[in-house]
Amino acid sequence: MTYIKDFDQLGRSDLDEAGGKGANLGELARAGFPVPPGFVLTTAAYQDFVNANGIAGRILELAALPTGAPNDDYDAAAGQIRALFAESTMPEEIGGELRAAYGRLGQQAAAVGEDAAALVAVRSSATAEDLASASFAGQQDTYLNVSGPDAVAAAVVDCWASLWNARAMAYRSRNGFDPATVRLAVVIQEMVDAAAAGVLFTANPATGRRDQVVISAAWGLGESVVSGAVATDDVVVDAATGRVEQRRTVDKNVMTVYDGTGTREQAVPEEKRREPVLDDDAAAALARQGTAIAKHFGSPQDIEWAQAAGEFFILQARPITALPEPSADTPTEWPLPYPDGMYFRASIVEQLPDPLSPLFADLIDGSVTKSLNALLNEAFGKSVVRPGDVSLPTVNGYAYYYYNNAGMRRVMGRSLSAMRALAQGKAHMGIKGWRDHSHPKYRGQVKFWAAKPPADRPAAELLEGISALLDAGAAYYTAVQSIIPIAATSEIMLRSYYDKLVRRPGDPSAEVFLLGYDSEPIRAEKSLYDLAVWTRESPPLAAAVTEGSADAIAEALRSGTPPAGVDGDVDPAQWDEWRSRLQRHLDRYGHAVYNLDFVNPVPADDPSALLETLRYFVRGQGKDPHERQQRSADRREEQARLISARLGPRRRAVFRRLLRWAQKAAPVREDALADVGLAWPLMRRMLLELGERLTASGVVAAPSDIFWLRLDELRNAIEFGLATPGAAISGTDRPVRAEAVEQRKMLWRGQRKAAAPQLLPESRSMERVFGSMMPARSVQQAGDVITGVGASSGRVSAPARLLHGPDDFASMRPGEVLVARMTTPAWTPLFAMASAVVTDVGGPLSHSSIVAREYGIPAVLGTGVATQRVSSGQQVMVDGDAGTVTLDGSGT
């Protein structure tokens, strides 16, 4: 049998025979890239070695550790397996072929004037290694500067044994690889007498940008670079031009060099410590080599390289795993579009926590400006607020309320009269205005446009309808904003009076008197819980709902085809009834927005996130919301009765009046907020219909790319007939706006990593005057204790779960601390699973606070930095009374 394969006999399809490293090196060598000479001792040699020595069964027996076994168990098993290999004998057939192949490398070395006993690297190459889904980098062993056939044979056995070291076994267990299926080949390759070496990524691993090559470089051999043992120069090169875009040259005090039959570290000569390892020309040449390799493999690559005598050699290439989507650099400056004014991230920030998509930004500015001007003109008089005084521009993509200085001075001078006007219900504001005018008018607009099927409407009419619906939504949101201060003022006055003149030791907090009321988010939770209870009545249906993926069930709802498992044990009629019940829930509550930007689907569009909570309830987890609310209501009424009974007539009258006011306003606030998104499912259908047409005509690559167009671009496409069914752009292989869309998405991802200031321009004086009014603390918090606002009492220590949006909801586990920039009514189902809530934005009267109290879990809101400082899996202590979040410093 032939156990040896030279590099030029191998390619990427030979993974089972050569392992990941060997197959990739063979592919590189055959393609003509500068790979040092070498060969692979195939996996068949490993298998025949363990079989010949009778240790295969014992290895698997020792490696059969349960998932999550402690490290000590892995260490013990690895030690016993290593002893099995050390006590075994190399079969002569394998040893003979290995000696002969090594001898041929020596002859090649002698032909160019080197020592006939070649210096080689002996490197493990597992079949579960250098894969696109998991790299397994560094899990098995490598031996450098090995010389002589006996030493090579010994290093091969050590490599085989390293397939079963503790870290490799634990890694495979976590990634779900069956121990019985893994085998190991060994790469034997000539050493390169490297003057410099390092690692090259053909895409930026930090930002995901595919147009940048990132090079780490150090003096000497590259093994210490891979292991992180030495400091490296870092160079970022533009992949298309070879231009060096960024350079960081460090003080390199240590390098790795040959030492006899191994390696050692030594000091870098003083004159080279601060000298760049690669100049611009060398970096460009290496980047070109890396880009060519990535093109050959068809995916971004992680490449080990070495430089000797001015030439570059490729030592290894593997796919980059877990590469993020491309993002631009995170902004650090906040340039103001209009310098003469003030910018606030107040109120609307709870609904717009992320940078805006371009189309939404263009449309919402006009809609909000129109609705705010109408409100302010009613409240202050038409001469007070003038064009340009108020708007909703973006800074680094984030929405800000803008007030110019002159307009603000005019408004402040009339503030008292304006408050009286709004209190009297002018401009259809307040609870009565919302109930009698704003809410019915908004519903009417949605009903009007819903009667016009999007597929049948001309493009111009669709855009008109989208604008009209967004205008209606913005006007409705402005009306909702008048309810929030009413609810806030009523609760503050009740709490102040109660705490100062009524409350005695042992009495409950004032918030108890506002709990137990139904609101739209609570009614939505009850509806979902009731569906779960009905589902549990049929164990086969419950199993089908909980065992399949939420995405698969969501797809079944869209297609009408039952998911896997339903057509077997579940009565099809029962599945249809379940689907019908869930659809009724979505029709009633599915417009709740996760984020006002219409780039984000609502549950009516994609119920996957909602299904995670439904499955939680179907499994019998969580509390019955009907019982929870009834207990809260009973306690509220009993405590109000007891306290009223002990008060004198005057204090009782004031207490009851304040109580009625606060109890009337609190639930309405949540009802009003929950319906902000009434138009969103219809508006998104209309936008995606336009997107379908633009995709067919070649303007964009996918219907959802419409969200990343500018409004002028969309209008131009409509004007030129490109959003008309059947229209097409001739002579183009790539959608005309594809590159712009990708650039905007990349910019948005970079912006999303920023912590947007609450106030602009940033200054201490602005912070002192207005900081207390903002919905988030300063982002300049350091240390292990994050401070926010204690919004719901209690103390919990639990692992954190950082959620950026509904795409992350499936990762939430019962009992974890929900950490997010903010929450809206659409997030409410997650509160049933959470042990506490922490947000960047919000306060004691925000949605997160009110819902956390209903669920009886602690909440710390408005931290400003929680999503920047907390990692999923990190243990945190949330103190809702003190308003603090304490980090323990560990994370996953």
Image: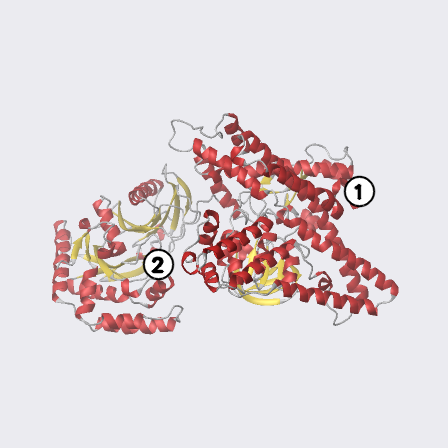
Spatial CA distance of label 2 from label 1 is 69 Å
For the residue pair 704 and 840, the one nearer the viewer reads as 704
Residue at numbered disc 2: 227
| Neighbours of disc 2 within 10 Å: few (<14), some (14-19), many (20+) | few
Amino acid at dot 1: Ala
Q: Quadrant of residue 258?
A: bottom left
- Quadrant of the image for the N terminus? bottom left
For the residue pair 736 and 241, the one nearer the viewer reads as 736
Residue at numbered disc 1: 421
- Whether residues under marks 2 and 1 lie with C-beta atoms below 8 angstroms apart, the answer is no
What x and y, as percent, mark residue 11? 22, 49
Q: Is residue 396 above or below residue 188?
A: above
For the residue pair 640 and 708, the one nearer the viewer reads as 640
In the displayed image of the protein, which residue is found farthest to the right?
649
> Does the image show residue 336?
no
What x and y, as percent, mark residue 598? 56, 42
